[in-house]
Structures are given as C-alpha cells and as structure tokens.
Amino acid sequence: MNILFLQWKVKLPPQKEVITSDELMAHLGDCLLSIKPQEKSEGLQLNFQQNVDDAMTVLPKLATGLDVNVRFTGVSDFEYTPECSIFDLLGIPLYHGWLVDPQSPEAVRAVGKLSYNQLVEKIITCKHSSDTNLVTEGLIAEQFLETTAAQLTYHGLCELTAAAKEGELSVFFRNNHFSTLTKHKVMRPCGATCTYWSPTRAFSRRKQVVWESLHNVDGDSCFCDADFHLSHSLGKGPGAEGGSGSPEKQRQVDQDYLIALSLQQQQPQGTLGLSDLELAQQLQQEEYQQQQGVQPVPARAPSPQADG
C-alpha cells in the first residue's frame, strides 16, 4: 500500500490522519479489480482472471501477514503462493536478499534449489539418516540458516543492488517483514548509488527518518528523510553531518537519530517473526508506555521462519 500511495495509484483525502486496515484492504481490492488484462487471447484472459480470483481470496488475510517461502537461489525467487499473485497483478517487484554465497560450494550443494520450508524438512531428514554424508550435508544446511538468521547475506545484497532498477519501488522481504525498497543515486562526491528501504517502525513515527540505507548486512547504515537528505551517518552519533539548523531543530534531529538507531539495532532480533498486526500492536504499546514514562517490554524473538 505504501508503494501504491507513492505511485499515486491510491489517493487519500488531504486531511486524513488515520486509516484502518479494513479501509486499506478496500483500496487494495479496488486496485486489483481495476486492472485489465493486457493479452487478448482467451487462454491468457482466463489465467488472468484466475490470478485475480486468487488475489481476492487471500485479501482478508493481508492485514495480519503474507505467506511467502523464499528460495535461496535469487533475489526474486519465491515459491509460488496465491499471495504472490497480488504482486504480479500490481506489477510490484518482490525481493529478498537471503542467498547462498556461490563461493561456499558446500553450502550451495547442501541448500541447492530448495525453498526455506523444503530446506527445513531436509535438515530434519538428514539428522535422522544413517548416511554420514547426508548427516554432514544436513549440518551444513543448518549452519547456513543459523549464520544467516538475519535473512540477508552479502551475496544477496550485491544481487539485490544489481537487480533493483534506479528509482524503482519494490517490496523487500527480510526478518519476516515487508518493507518498501527503492534505489536512489546519492548526490555525493563519489556519486554512489545506494539501495534504501523504509523501516516501518521509524517511518511511521518520525518525519526526519523515512529511508534507511541498505549497504551493510550488519546494520551499519544511515537514515534519510523523504528527500534522501542524510539525517545522521550511523555510528557518528548526534551532531554529525546533516545536523545544521536551529538548536530546536537540531534537538529534534538528535532525538530522531537516537530513536532510529535504537529501532535499527532491535530489528534483526526484536521483530523476528512478528506479523504486521503484532508489530502495529507493539508500536501502539510502546508509544503509550513512552507517554506514561514506562519502560517498554522487549518483543519476543521466535526462531526464524520464512513466513511474513
């Protein structure tokens, strides 16, 4: 929905400050029903209609999460589910960065072209095998999942940067959550092109923090406003570049930075496995606790899964 808003395919009344999930789903349904098939042949039109029917069937589930199952072979590789048809119909790319590094041949052999769910089943099967080769392969696969629990690898990040088009708006799946992703050329001396994603927690609460750069698996990133102006370079702390302006504005920027830094550090573990609904409820609870001066309760951190 963020992408549809940014593309002006969905418009809200100018003064509207609150929108319910039911209203969002109604807007999304209208968008899906307004799409016309590009192909005229009867077979392709029937296939198109089937995709629309599949998308409308899963529409009520979207408020609480999407069922996706990644494959570790490419940034656009997902096992097909009815939910995926929504992205296809709307022409919105769906990416992830959870790839096996081809320079690790043992991991490549162990993971193969399996999806996440299939790989978990393989690990369980291999553990109970009497074949030592299969046991070893299962351990290698399990180690891969453990060492990439943040669901992003350096190889995946490189492939993601190459696959995303300049200015393209896409959906990025990581840590069982979906974010808005774009690639924007930063106007700096190096003329670098950087991929940015919109961290929902920060995006929904602070105007100074809209985009977070995605150039490091370990989270050493920077935060920008809606115009990609740097708020702070992560790791330099308040008062670093982007901190000019009045003392009041600077205090606001410093506060934004500290909140964004805190949220970014919590993201890999703190929101792992949370559905969009659970995350929204957690945000509301934290907001209330901050107003009341109560220390927030840490989020649960279940084992990694590939369901959004």
Image (spheres, grey):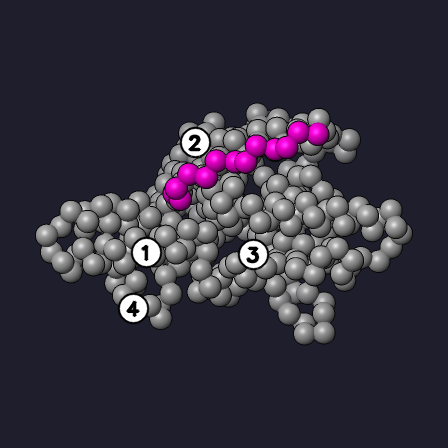
Foreground residue among 108 and 91: 108
The answer to which quarter of the image holds residue 61 is top left
Q: Do the residues labelled 2 and 1 touch (CB within 8 Å)?
A: no
Determine which residue is flagged by label 1.
143
Q: Cβ–Cβ below 8 Å for labels 3 and 1? A: no
| Mark 1 or mark 4: whose residue is earlier in sequence | 4
User: Total marks drawn?
Assistant: 4
Where is the N terminus found, in terms of image quarters?
top right
Q: Where is residue 71 in the image (x, y as percent from the top left)?
A: 35, 53
Left or right? Give the position of 51 relative to 106.
Answer: right
Residue type at mark 3?
Gly
Q: Is residue 166 above or below residue 264?
A: below
Residue at disc 1, secondary structure: helix
C-alpha span from label 1 to label 4? 14 Å
Q: Residue 300 in the image: x percent, y percent? A: 48, 35
Tell me the CA gap for discs 3 and 2. Answer: 33 Å
User: Earlier along the polypeptide chain: callout 2 or callout 1?
Assistant: 2
How far apart marks 4 and 3 lie (CA) works out to: 26 Å
Q: Compute the Cα span from label 3 to label 1.
A: 21 Å
Which residue is labeled 4 in the image? 105
Disc number lying in front (3 or 2): 3
Q: In which quarter of the image is residue 182?
A: bottom right
Q: Would residue 138 appear left or right of 238 to someone viewing this image?
A: left
Q: Mark 2 points at which residue?
A: 58
Q: Please name the amino acid that badge 1 sits on.
A: Gln
Residue denoted by label 3: 219
Region in magenta: 293-305
